[in-house]
Amino acid sequence: MQDDKCDYFTIFNSRPQISSDDIETSRPVYEHNYDVIHYKLVQNVNIVEEGIVASAYVTVDSTVDGLDEINFDFCGLEVDGVYRDGNSLSYTMYENEEYINIKLDRNFNIGERFTIQVDYHGEPEDCLAFSNDYAFTYAWPDLAHYLYPCYDDPSDKAESSEVVVTVPDNYYVASNGTLLSVHDDGDRKTYHWYESYPIATYLMCYHCYPYAIVEYSYNSMPVLGYVEPDQYDDAFIFLENQAEMIECFATRFMIEYPFITEKYAIATCPIGGGMENQTCTSIGSSYVRGDHYYDWLLAHECAHSWWGDMVTCET
């Protein structure tokens, strides 16, 4: 245990930070005439063939009168159909520019809400990785459009989101927010997660693996570790200070943990370092050990729940 709980704050504050000047992107930024309200991702993940069969439901409000077409960032996957309220819509994929243009079946005025459904399949070129029996997403800073159609701007947040993922029955799926249900279909299971807080596309995630689950708590909120089964004992030690870190930051920032009605979790995957996905941080599986050597990493990623997840970059 730490002698001073707020040593965690010092550790976080001393880590090198990345500015927007360090991020380069060749993808054009398009003017868009809508506000995303909700994303729902439905994905059937084939671990062996490293592909997906998927549907994305994007609910938006028009921000102009007479909206008759809509663009989403999207590329690298085969579109099977585009719909609104069951009506088939015409569309054009612009692979080089990495977006899809959809012609709407009627005009929408300011404030009118509608949902676009895009059915698609394929092997994602980015964002979703398959490695060491894992399937996991890594969308920072604007890679989500390789996995689903969206407005892929790090500063833009939907009001809420859902992630529904089907995997082999021995797998578990960890994602944002609260687990609503698990449907067992024999040799496959479907996990349905719901995020009730505003979320940016680069913070939406899922991790698929035959996880073991370590559980602590903070103010009755679950503090979870989704870890490899052979790391289970070490993970209890690895994570025993996590709730204390949350308490430290809530005290120092004078703001309660921003997603207190849901959870804080880490999910291992084969990466270097970590990624502060909202309520479900990715942590490299090689860092899990039976001591506190990597408390600095846990503290750093946890602090991003306030600065990165709750408050997200605009530039």
Image (cartoon, rainbow, N blue to C red):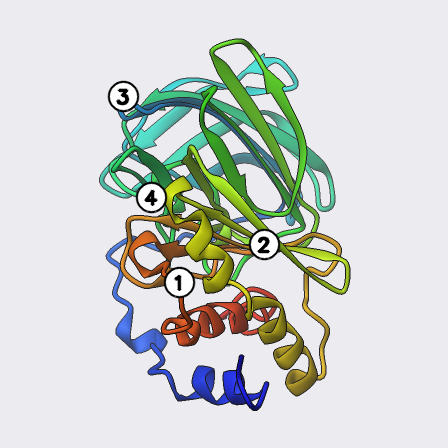
Residue 248 visible here: yes
How far is disc 2 from disc 3 in space, using C-alphas? Answer: 30 Å
Counting residues from the start of the chain, the first of labels 1 and 3 encountered is 3
Assess disc 1: are there few (<14), some (14-19) or many (≥20) residues with their C-alpha within 10 Å of its C-alpha.
some
Counting residues from the start of the chain, the first of labels 2 and 3 encountered is 3
Counting residues from the start of the chain, the first of labels 4 and 1 encountered is 4
Residue type for callout 3: Val
- Seen at 50% across and 35% down, the residue is 173
Where does label 3 land, which residue? 48
Counting residues from the start of the chain, the first of labels 2 and 1 encountered is 2
Where does label 1 land, which residue? 290
Counting residues from the start of the chain, the first of labels 3 and 4 encountered is 3
Residue 208 is situated, as x and y percent measured from the top left of the image, at 42, 35
Where does label 2 land, which residue? 199
Residue type for callout 4: Cys
Determine contact: label 4, label 1, CB under 8 Å.
no
Image mark for residue 127:
4
Q: Nearer the viewer, residue 202 or 45?
A: 45
**Camera-nearest label, 3 or 4:** 3
